[in-house]
Image (cartoon, coloured by chain):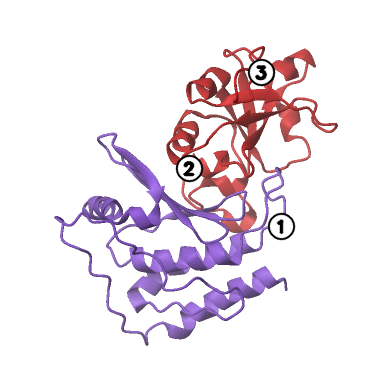
Chain colours: A purple, B red
C-alpha cells in the first residue's frame, strides 16, 4: 500500500472512528450585514503530513460525506499520469484540506459537491445549480482558491481567506433552492 | 510569436484545438447528465497541452488519433479564436510521439476555466471507470 493510499485509509477511518460520538458546535455564520473578510473555513494548523487525521463531524454530516469519502479513496488511488498529460497523484495535504472544508460547508443545508482531481495533485469541489456555480480549488499544498458565479452573472474569484461572506451568500443561495 | 504571450499567429482562429478528457473530469459520477469540469483546463506549469487541428489536417489525420492508446478517454474541441479572446496564446510544440502537439499559454483563472468548460464541444465522451458507473 502506497503512502498516499495509507493516508486515504486514515482519512476514512478518522471519520468513521468519530461518527456518532462527536457533538461539535455547528458553524455559526455571521449576520447578513457582516461583510468583513475573515479567515474562516480554514484549519487551525496545516496537516503535518505524518500524523493520523481525525475530522470530527456529526452523524448527519458524516452520512452526507460518505459518498465523497468513497470518491476520495478512488481518487487517491490514481496513478501518476492519470490524465494522460503527466498529472501527479492527488496529494495528501489537498485531501485533508478538502475534507475539512467539506465538513464545515455541509453544516449548511447545501447539496453535496462533485469532487474532481486536478493535474497538479490538488482537488476541486464543485457546485452547479441552475446558473449558479461555485468551485473550490484545493491546491496540493492545501491553499484554496474560490471561484463563484451567481445567476445575475456576478462572478468573484480569489483566496478562500478573502471569500467568507461571498461564500456564505452563495451557500445560502443554493441552500434555499435545494 | 506575438508580444510576451507565446502565440503563433499562423494558427488560424477558425481552427480548433483538441484536448483529451480523463474519465475523472466527466461527471458527476453515477448521474445521467454529465459535464466536463473546469479542472480539465487547469495547467500545471503555465501551459495546457492540446492537439492542433491545423497540424492534424496537414498530416491528413483525424482527431481520433489523439485518443489512440488512451482507452476510456474523451475528447473536446475549443476554437482558437475563443482562446485568443480569453487572452490565451496557442503555439506548436510537436513531440516525437505527438507531432500535432501544441500548448495553450496564458493565465487560466477560475472564470477562464469556467468559460472553457462551457464552450468546449464534446467530440467523444469519456467512458467512466467500472467502479464509477451508475
Front position in the image: A133 or A157: A157
Q: Which residue position holds label 2?
A: B34
Q: Position of residue A47 (x, y in %)?
A: 53, 72
Q: Is residue A5 left or right of residue A137?
A: right
Q: Position of residue B63 (x, y in %)?
A: 70, 25
Chain designation of label 1: A
Front position in the image: A140 or B29: A140
Q: Which residue position holds label 1?
A: A79
Q: Secondary structure at mark 3?
A: loop
Chain designation of label 2: B
Quadrant where the N terminus of chain A lies? bottom right
**Mark 1–mark 3 CB contact (< 8 Å):** no
N-term-proximal mark, 3 vs 2: 3
Report whether residue A147 is seen.
no
Pointer 3 local density, CA inside 10 Å: few below 14, some 14–19, many at least 20 = few
Marks 1 and 3 belong to one chain: no
Q: Secondary structure at mark 1?
A: loop
Amino acid at each position: 500500500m502506497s503512502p498516499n493510499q495509507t493516508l486515504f485509509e486514515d482519512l476514512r477511518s478518522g471519520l468513521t472512528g468519530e461518527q456518532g460520538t462527536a457533538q461539535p458546535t455547528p458553524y455559526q455564520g455571521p449576520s447578513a450585514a457582516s461583510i468583513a473578510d475573515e479567515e474562516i473555513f480554514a484549519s487551525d494548523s496545516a496537516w503535518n503530513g505524518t500524523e493520523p487525521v481525525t475530522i470530527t463531524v456529526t452523524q448527519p454530516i458524516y452520512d452526507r460525506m460518505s459518498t465523497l469519502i468513497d470518491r476520495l479513496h478512488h481518487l487517491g488511488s490514481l496513478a501518476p499520469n492519470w490524465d494522460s498529460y503527466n498529472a501527479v497523484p492527488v496529494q495528501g495535504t489537498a485531501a485533508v484540506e478538502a475534507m475539512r472544508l467539506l465538513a464545515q460547508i455541509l453544516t449548511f443545508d447545501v447539496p453535496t459537491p462533485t469532487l474532481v482531481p486536478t493535474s497538479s495533485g490538488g482537488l476541486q469541489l464543485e457546485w452547479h445549480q441552475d446558473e449558479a456555480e461555485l468551485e473550490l480549488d484545493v491546491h496540493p499544498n492545501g491553499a484554496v482558491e474560490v471561484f463563484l458565479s451567481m445567476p445575475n452573472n456576478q462572478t468573484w474569484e480569489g483566496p478562500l481567506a478573502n471569500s467568507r461572506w461571498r461564500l456564505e451568500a452563495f451557500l445560502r443561495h443554493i441552500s434555499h433552492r435545494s | 510569436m506575438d508580444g510576451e504571450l507565446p502565440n503563433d499567429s499562423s494558427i488560424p482562429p477558425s481552427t480548433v484545438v483538441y484536448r483529451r478528457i480523463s474519465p475523472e473530469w466527466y461527471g458527476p459520477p453515477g448521474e445521467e447528465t454529465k459535464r466536463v469540469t473546469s479542472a480539465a483546463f487547469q495547467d500545471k506549469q503555465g501551459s495546457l497541452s492540446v492537439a492542433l487541428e491545423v497540424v492534424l489536417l496537414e498530416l491528413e489525420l483525424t482527431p481520433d488519433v489523439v485518443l489512440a492508446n488512451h482507452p476510456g478517454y474523451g475528447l473536446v474541441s475549443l476554437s482558437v479564436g475563443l482562446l485568443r479572446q480569453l487572452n490565451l496564446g496557442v503555439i506548436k510544440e510537436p513531440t516525437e510521439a505527438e507531432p500535432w502537439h501544441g500548448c495553450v499559454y496564458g493565465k487560466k483563472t477560475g472564470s477562464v476555466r469556467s468559460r472553457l468548460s462551457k464552450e468546449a464541444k464534446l467530440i467523444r465522451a469519456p467512458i467512466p471507470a467500472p467502479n464509477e458507473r451508475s
